[in-house]
Image (cartoon, grey):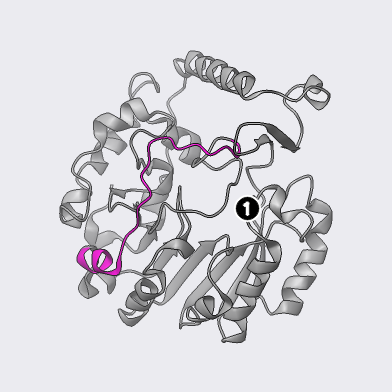
Amino acid sequence: MLKIHEIEQLQLEISTKCNARCPMCVRNYRGMEYNDGYPETELRLDDIKQMFSPEFLKQIKRILFNGNLGDFGLAKDAVEIVRYFVESGVRHIDISTNGGMRTPAWWAQLALPGVQVGFALDGLADTHSLYRQDTDWHKVIENAQGLIKAGGRAIWRFIPFDHNRHQEEECRKLSTDLGFVQFQNIGRGRDRGYVFTRTGEYSHLIGAPYRPEDLTTPPTMKVLLQDHLTWTATRKRHEKDTPVINVDCHHKRVKELYIAANGEVYPCCWLGFYPRTMFHRGNEVLKTLVHENNALEYSLEHCVEWFNKIEESWAKESIPAGRLYACVETCSK
């Protein structure tokens, strides 16, 4: 795995807080108010300065603000952190957000050299919130306009679902009319699932049902949890026969580090295991590998020492024998 002096890209999650309730997000269970053990926390400007010196940042070509649990826009020092990176000479900064918080004037502060902001806009006003629950399409547009009018670079990021595919061309045209510099069709994942209310009552279906009868008799949370346990058991049976594969490691290919909102360092977001109580495919093995990886307590050099154990796991004969599931699932050739 890479040494610190070889790192050229950072992916940062500076907050585990989020205003949205997206049903296929790991921070809740299909839209319910569900917390799987993670505290709501964030990185402050002083934390960032402690972890990343101006000298270290001279080697960084790109920074991505994205995360597993939270949204960039809810971190108290979000703007100040971006300014620090810009002033330190980082030339490419990409921010992902649902954009449903703050004000147009706040977003206008991110009209900075090399900075672009991707706003999650999954359709038009009538379809957007079917997935981006608790966000308002009009507010996201207003916030994006605040950035654009200040001279900033805004990107329209669109996840296609069955309920919004017919609106893609209209969204694409509207993005141009409103001054977005780019329209991105994310085009993968999160396209199927049941959606529940905060209290666990069935709300609606995204994509095709898993069983035909679910169209007439919506599933209960109890049924879905049982299905999840059954799927997990089936996966474990198949994993014992997993063939040896070659891993085209994202961390090594793009020379990236992923830093969680509590300062923990991982090679990529797929192995980002904060908190360690959270459901993570293959976490039994990963728990045994992670070691002294918090950059608020140790140097970056020390925080990446355990990465070599990841690469060693790829030579294991199967996932039950110790090969990391996330590496097989995400980066196998």
Residue 14, image x and y in percent?
38, 59
Looking at the image, can residue 66 be seen? yes
Q: What residue occupies the far front of the structure in this picture?
A: 199
Q: Residue at x 63, y 43 (%)?
A: 189
Residue at the spot of label 1: 134
Above or below, comparing residue 13 to residue 206 in the picture: below
Which range of residues does the magenta coloring cover?
30-50
In this rendering, the count of numbered labels is 1
314 magenta-colored: no
Q: Residue 197 is drawn in which quadrant?
A: top right
Residue 4, image x and y in percent?
23, 58
Q: Residue 324 is drawn in which quadrant?
A: top left
Front one among 299 and 320: 299
Residue type, label 1: Asp
Residue 56, image x and y in percent?
23, 69
68 left or right of 192 in image: left
